Amino acid sequence: ILNVEQSPQSLHVQEGDSTNFTCSFPSSNFYALHWYRWETAKSPEALFVMTLNGDEKKKGRISATLNTKEGYSYLYIKGSQPEDSATYLCALDQTGANNLFFGTGTRLTVIP
Amino acid sequence: DGGITQSPKYLFRKEGQNVTLSCEQNLNHDAMYWYRQDPGQGLRLIYYSQIVNDFQKGDIAEGYSVSREKKESFPLTVTSAQKNPTAFYLCASSPQASANPTSYEQYFGPGTRLTVT
């Protein structure tokens, strides 16, 4: 069982604040890193799939970076909105078989 | 509407009974997956299938069985051998990983919450 760790476990931010959280993973045998957003009472939805060291991806106010050599990825949310409230999951694919190892998630609450 | 459906949303069973959870997708995805979520833990992979009539064990396959007779369907049976079956079960699908790795994100169903007493 791989150790994919996410921090913090939860956080509360004010509407308009920017925030970021971390996903760390074993740097050996890396193929891809996935980020998902899971809103309460909904299904997890994909945000990014990242494969290259130094890669940076952006979707609206959300962006992510990847460092495969040191084994971490950051997710950034600029100008948080209440609708950003969700649990953000990262998951590691080591082989390309899409056999994902998930972290426990970061639960974000944006206070209006 | 393309997507993944899981039924039922809530399921209750007596200990010792087998139960089958349904998962159907109309996204024409080759690969399908079953995960389990327990409080305080990340999603854990039970079984996955990359193609019809083929499937592989994930990290926690003991006490579970699957079949993949059709591309669109991947039912999961929770057998009486599973020691702690009460959990939230998520099904997912994705295109084949070999196509373009940055496009093979997984699409998830709404989940089934199973309670065994």
Image (cartoon, rainbow, N blue to C red):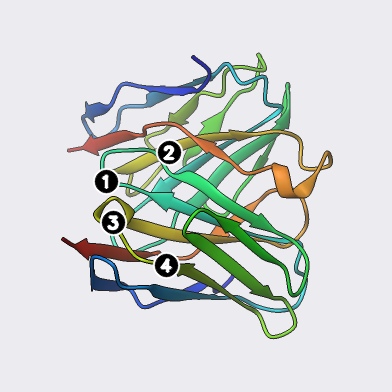
Determine the chain carrying the residue at label 4.
A
Q: Secondary structure at mark 2?
A: strand
Which residue is painted at 28% across and 58% down in the image? B39
Q: Earlier in the sequence, mark 3 or mark 1?
A: 1
| Residue A78, disc | 4
Q: Earlier in the sequence, mark 3 or mark 4?
A: 4
Residue that extends furthest to the bottom in the rendered view of this protein: A70
* Three-letter residue code for mark 2: Leu
Mark earlier in primary sequence (4, 1): 1
Q: Quadrant of the N terminus of chain A?
A: bottom right
User: Of the residues shown, which amino acid type is indicated by label 4?
Assistant: Lys
**Residues flagged by tags 2 and 3 on a common chain:** no
Q: CA distance from mark 4 to mark 1?
A: 21 Å
What residue sits right under mark 1 in the picture? A40
Side (left or right) of A60 relative to B21: right
Circle nearer the viewer, 3 or 4: 4
Task: Decide: few, some or many residues near mark 4? Use Cα within 10 Å; few <14, some 14-19, many ≥20.
Answer: some
